[in-house]
Amino acid sequence: MRVKRRTFIAAVGGAAAWPLAARAQQAGAMRRVGVLMVESDPVGQLHLKLFVQKLQELGWTDGRNIHIEVRLTGTDAERIQKFAKELVAWQPDVIATNSTPGTAAVQRETRMIPTVFVVVSDPVGEGFVASLARPGGNITGFINYEASIAGKWVDLLKEIDPRLVRAAGLFNPDAAPGGGSFFLRPFEAAARSLAITPLATPVRSDADIEAAIAALSSEPGGGLVMMADSFMGSHRARLIEQAARHKVLAVYPFRSASADGGLLSYGPDFSDLYLQQGLYVDRILRGAKPNELPVQVPTKFELVVNLRTAKALGLELPATLLGRADEVIE
């Protein structure tokens, strides 16, 4: 999906009323920011709005001194690459991305245009940066997860139901960091330490998700962890639906999953990540170099429990878990 500039400004509350003549006069002085986003759902739109609002707070107003060009790609690899090519051809001052596939697509098109990512878990392993402290090229940004969080997801699953003996980790090998290995290693280690059999479960379609959850539910004592990648995020509705249908316990990496009916989520505060991305884009527009800006790790995390879903599953969640939750949906 290509978002026209005028439509985008209206969507995020920007300066849509600027006359065309004034825009034309300002065009030569405007800085350019390209945005390559995977999501086009309401959550994605909220994150985009936060990013733009942060730029506005820092003095950048679309239509006055900055031109923001947005591409919403979905998860199709060809579309991602096509839109990355379009944005690079537009020659922006900086490009903002929000996925590993999107960042990789931009990197294939340019090693010169500054790029600031969010929602990338393993930028060193993916070859985006030389190290977190010294990125070393034209790319920097904000990690959403460190690998060790996968162990925490397993811990939470066991805390929900101590009788758990099998845990499936669902991931998309084409979108997951390291093809899945980034999260799978700590996931499997944590599971074995808790006497749980880990099941690495790659999925590439809604049909794969349905089949995986149906198979997991065929025997008692099973639960699942949704690994964090752009495909799983875009297909979370199907996973939540199937987990409810088959009464399978599930832990999710995104707060939006709990809000949509998922049992429990634990992960970074994504709103904060997009605000931080705006800060780095501002610094680059004011002269900073990407290789001077270290890659940052998340500092704010959210534990969200959906009590309605727990009741539908017949679960009585531990009081200690509910007491630690940042939000309980009732």
Image: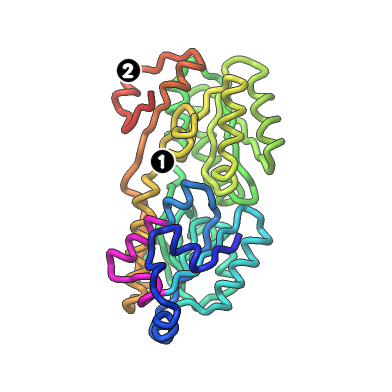
Give the residue pinned by disc 1. 267
Mark closer to the chain start, 2 or 1: 1
**Quadrant of the rendering where the C terminus is positioned:** top left
Give the residue pinned by disc 2. 319
* Left or right of residue 117, residue 181 in this image: right
Q: Secondary structure at mark 1?
A: strand
Number of marks in the rendered image? 2
Question: Residue 26 in the image: x percent, y percent?
Answer: 39, 83
Question: Where are the magenta residues, as a range?
Answer: 49-66
Q: Is residue 83 above or below residue 229?
A: below
Q: Residue 48 got which mark?
A: none
**Any part of residue 290 in sight:** no
C-alpha gap between disc 2 and disc 1: 20 Å
Q: Is residue 303 above or below residue 73?
A: above
Q: Which amino acid lies under the numbered mark 2 shown in the image of this protein?
A: Ala
Question: Residue 295 in the image: x percent, y percent?
Answer: 38, 61
Question: Residue 15 in the image: x percent, y percent?
Answer: 37, 68
* Left or right of residue 238, residue 318 in this image: left
Binning the other alpha carbons within 10 Å of mark 1 as few (below 14), some (14 to 19) or many (20 upward) gives: many
**Any part of residue 188 in sight:** yes
